[in-house]
Amino acid sequence: MPATMPATMPATGPKSVVITGGASGIGAAVAAKVTATGGHVAIIDINADAAAAKAKELGANATWAVANAADEVTLDRAHRELAGRMPPIDGLVPCAGSPEVPRPIEDMPVETWERIFDSHMKTTYVTCKVFGPAMAQRGHGAIVNISSVVGLRQGAHLAYGPAKMAIANLTQMLAVQWARKGLRVNAVAPGVVDTPFIRPPERGGTRDLSPILASTPIGRLLQPEEIAEVIYFLLSPAASAMTGSIVTCDGGFIAGTGWSLFGGVPQT
Ligand SMILES: NC(=O)c1ccc[n+]([C@@H]2O[C@H](COP(=O)([O-])OP(=O)(O)OC[C@H]3O[C@@H](n4cnc5c(N)ncnc54)[C@H](O)[C@@H]3O)[C@@H](O)[C@H]2O)c1
C-alpha cells in the first residue's frame, strides 16, 4: 500500500470481522454492530453453545467457531475453518478474557495468576499472530485490542492490570511493525462495562457497584454497545489516521482519578 492518504475516504465500515470472545458482552455487541451495518462476522469463543446461539441470533452474515484463543493450535484450526465461510478478513477484535477477583499476592496461586494473565495477554498475542499476517499481506485491515482503564492506571489486580498494560504495549509495537502494510492496530481502554465479566461466579454473580458508580464521573456503568461504537469506528476507514492509539472510553474515569484528593468526583 502506498504511504499516502487515501484519495477518497470510503464511507463504509469493516466488511468481514473476526471477534474472539464474541459470544458475550463487548465482543457480542461488536458482532451485532457489524452485521447490522451489512458486514460479516465470525464469532470465536471457548463456549461453543454461546457462540452458536449468538451467530444464529445475528443471522446469515454471522458464523462461528470454537477455540481457546490462548492456544495457537485450536485458533489456527478455527482460522482455516472460517476461511471458506466469510469474505477476506479486514477486521480483528481479540475480546476474550476471564475476570480476576482482587486478593493479596499471598492468596494468589501462580497457576491462577497465569490462567488470568494468559486469558488476556496470551489470547491477544495469539489472536494477532494467527490472523494479523494475512491482513498485512493483503495490505488492508484494522485490529482493535482491548486494554482497560486498570491497564493505564494502577489498580487492585495482580494479573488483569499487568495483562491490560502489556496489551497496550503490544498494540503499539504491532502498530509500528504493520504501519506500512496498511494494517492499523489500536486499542480501546474501557471503564466498567455492564457485562457478565463484572459479576463473575466467584462473586456469586453479584457485586456492590456503588464504589464504581461513585468514582465514574458520568455516574453509571457503560453499556457494551457504547464500547462497540468506538471499536467499530477504529475498525472503519474513517479512522485511517489512527494507529498505535490507546483510546479510553470510560465515562471520565481516568480524568477523575486525581479528584480522590479533593473528596472524589462530583456526585451531582
Ligand atoms: N466488562 C468490563 O467492565 C470491561 C472493562 C474493560 C475491559 N474489558 C475487557 O473486554 C473484553 C470482553 O469483556 P466482556 O466484559 O465482554 O466479558 P464477557 O465475560 O461478557 O465476555 C468474554 C467472552 O470471552 C470468552 N472467553 C474467555 N476466555 C476465552 C478464551 N481463552 N478463548 C476464547 N474465548 C474466551 C467467554 O466465553 C466470553 O464469551 C475482556 O478482554 C475484558 O477484559 C471489560
Image: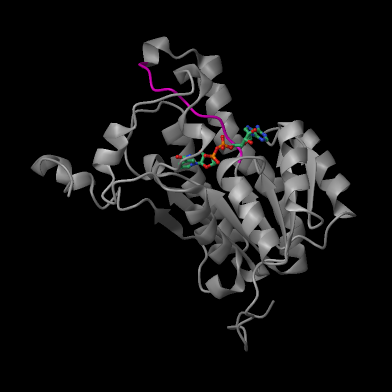
Q: Is residue 125 magenta?
A: no
In the image, residue 85 lies at what x, y percent? Answer: 87, 54
Q: Quadrant of the N terminus?
A: bottom right
Instruction: Judge whether 69 appears above or below 245 on screen.
Output: above
Q: Nearer the viewer, residue 72 or 12?
A: 12
Residue positioned most to the bottom: 7
Residue for point 16% across, 42% down: 264
Point out the stretch of residues depicted in magenta. 96-104
Residue for point 86% across, 47% down: 80
In the image, residue 161 lies at what x, y percent? Answer: 42, 35
Q: How is the image coloured?
A: one colour
Residue for point 50% across, 60% down: 230
Quarter location, residue 142: bottom right
On the question of residue 94 being in view, the answer is no
In the image, residue 134 lies at what x, y percent? Answer: 77, 58
Quadrant location, ligand no. 1: top right
Quarter location, residue 238: bottom right
Instruction: Count the numbered circles shown.
Output: 0
In the image, residue 105 lies at what x, y percent? Answer: 38, 16
- From the viewer's perspective, is 60 left or right of 5? right
Instruction: Judge whether 190 appears above or below 195 on screen.
Output: below
- From the viewer's perspective, is 250 left or right of 197? left
